[in-house]
Amino acid sequence: MANSSSITHFLLLPFPGTRQLQLLHFCLFLAIYLAALLGNGLIITTIAWDHHLHTPMYFFLLNLSFLDLGAISTTLPKSMSNSLRNSRDISYAGCTVQVFFFLLLIVGEYFLLTVMSYDRYVAICRPLHYETLLGSRVCLHLAAAAWASGALNALLHTANTFSLPLCHGNAVDQFFCEVPQILKLSCSTSYLRELWLIVFSVCLYCVCFVFIVVSYVQIFRAVLRIPSQQGHHKAFATCLPHLAVVSLFLSTAFFAYLKPPSVSSPSLDLLVAVVYSVVPPAVNPLIYSLRNQELKAALGQLITGCFQKQ
């Protein structure tokens, strides 16, 4: 029996099988990671380079790409390194830092997606008030609020989780340090304090989700009044994938943090964690770039300019 004061490292979930399967896991995660780096990196570079994209919508998209890059960089590199070295170790401090930054970035991303739905609502439903409601100062405040909310959430959950006495070993049944898996190692009823904090956070996320859904319902109602079929297609092609990714992220995250222990299994927990922690950062660039003509045009000009300079 170990307690938290004697734990110097944690053991992450091993990927069972032969050495070839471990290398396959490494290659799969590497491909996803490089795709996320490339997609989000191109969005950041293009928006920063083209002054025509210096608008509220692209400012929020720029922040989203930074959050996506940070979130996926917090979890995948350590998992890939362990697979390559045939290891499971992560230091106690490293686990703490991973939990903090993952929660900061993933929660900050969710709040930013809420802000982005409001931006689209104002742009489509109240276009005459767009400059007033979403001026540069307001945009800065909204983006800062998303980052700060993620940081506060991460600080509370990390402090609560790692203040608990841990006496059920140091094996974390996940490919990264995840709060629900660390709570399983606790031997004290004080873990209920963290559970209540999780329930409160879930209620807050539900309020944000309702806000997102209401915003898109208002957008769809406004778009359907427009006779242009092209306008309908553009709005639905942009909003529906966004709503689908938010729904997928929220449902799997809720399942990971609120599921009863009786339905828990290593393979199911792994699948759910991959869906809510890896898929959104990799998929968001596709949703916001391939379906955005302005961004695609600016990216084409950037690439053309780089080749011409060479």
Image (tube, rainbow, N blue to C red):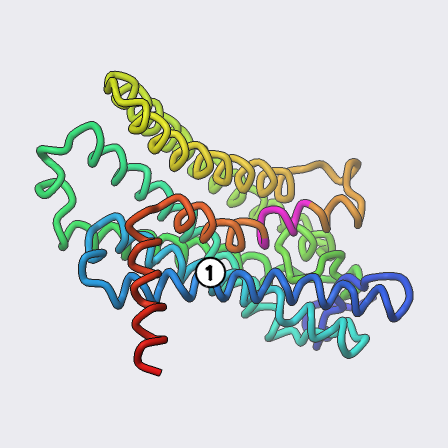
Q: Quadrant of the C terminus?
A: bottom left
Q: Quadrant of residue 176?
A: bottom right
Dominant secondary structure (helix, strand or loop) of the stretch shown in magenta: helix
x 50%, y 40%: residue: 245
Which is nearer the eye, 87 or 233? 233
Magenta stretch: includes residue 275? yes
Q: Is residue 86 visible?
A: yes
Q: Quadrant of the N terminus?
A: bottom right
Side (left or right) of 248 relative to 241: right
Q: In the displayed structure, would residue 164 be above or below residue 93?
A: above
- Write down the region rendered in magenta: 272-278
Side (left or right) of 266 relative to 70: right
* Number of numbered tags placed on the structure image: 1
x 81%, y 62%: residue: 15
- Residue type indicated by callout 1: Gly
Q: Quadrant of residue 78?
A: bottom right
Which is nearer the eye, 26 or 86? 26
Q: In the displayed structure, would residue 71 be above or below residue 87?
A: above
x 14%, y 54%: residue: 136
Side (left or right) of 245 relative to 179: left
Q: Residue furthest right?
A: 18
SS for tag 1? helix
Q: In the displayed structure, would residue 39 be above or below residue 84?
A: above
Which is nearer the eye, 79 or 96? 79
Q: Residue furthest front?
A: 308
Residue 43: where, in percent of width, then height? 37, 60
Q: In the displayed structure, would residue 222 be above or below residue 242?
A: above
x 32%, y 47%: residue: 293
> Dot 1 corresponds to which residue?
39
Q: Residues within 10 Å of mark 1 (few under 14, many from 20)?
A: many
